[in-house]
Image: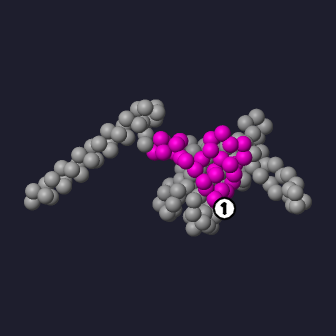
Amino acid sequence: MVRTALALINQSFSNLLTKIHRRYILWKYGYKDWAVYQRMTDPDIFWRATRILDFYHGYPYVYCIENRNHQAYYWDLAIDGGWRLHQWCEKNCEDKFRFDGHRVRKQTPIGINGVEESEWWVDEIGGGDYIFAAFKSERDFNWFMLKWS
């Protein structure tokens, strides 16, 4: 009885310290929400990248939603289209995922072997706005492609 009471007190004290620590981190870096802090400090993202593959260096599966008639581009509904994709992924994905909008251009250089390889480059001045979906696991990526592509 005494041991269980002490264990409960210890656990509640540990939870309290965790909450205080998280609030301090949010205050220190100027974020209001823990989810936003984790999104902005994601170690699998390189914010100063010039290519999309470099930006998502920790995500092996990246998909650009190029079709402008896709549900993700329904901006009339206050970003409702992208929100539907995000909710579906939260419910069905097992690993990390993220959606980001980028202003990019698609460049098709000819490689050393003579094969054309198209790549997305970040271009803030002359690029077009596209939504990218990035996934850590192949299973999540395949489910997303079957449902939304």
Residue 8 visible to an observer of this rendering: yes
Q: Return the residue nearer the eye: 5 or 95.
A: 5
Q: Residue at x 36, y 37 (%)?
A: 23
Which quarter of the picture shows residue 7? bottom left
Q: Is residue 121 above or below residue 26?
A: below
- Point out residue 118 in the picture as x, y percentages from the top left corner: 80, 54
Q: Return the residue nearer the eye: 25 or 73.
A: 25
**Is residue 133 covered in magenta?**
no
Indicate the quadrant containing the C terminus: top left, top right, bottom left or bottom right. Answer: bottom right
What's under tag 1, amino acid-wise?
A: Ser
- Point out residue 80 in the picture as x, y percentages from the top left corner: 55, 48
| SS for dot 1 | loop
Residue highlighted by disc 1 = 149
Residue 74 visible to an observer of this rendering: no
Dot 1, crowdedness within 10 Å: few (<14), some or many (≥20)?
Answer: few
Q: Return the residue nearer the eye: 121 or 25.
A: 25
Q: Residue at x 54, y 50 (%)?
A: 83
Left or right, residue 15 beside residue 109:
left
Q: Return the residue nearer the eye: 46 or 123.
A: 46
Indicate the quadrant containing the N terminus: top left, top right, bottom left or bottom right. Answer: bottom left
Magenta extent: 35-64
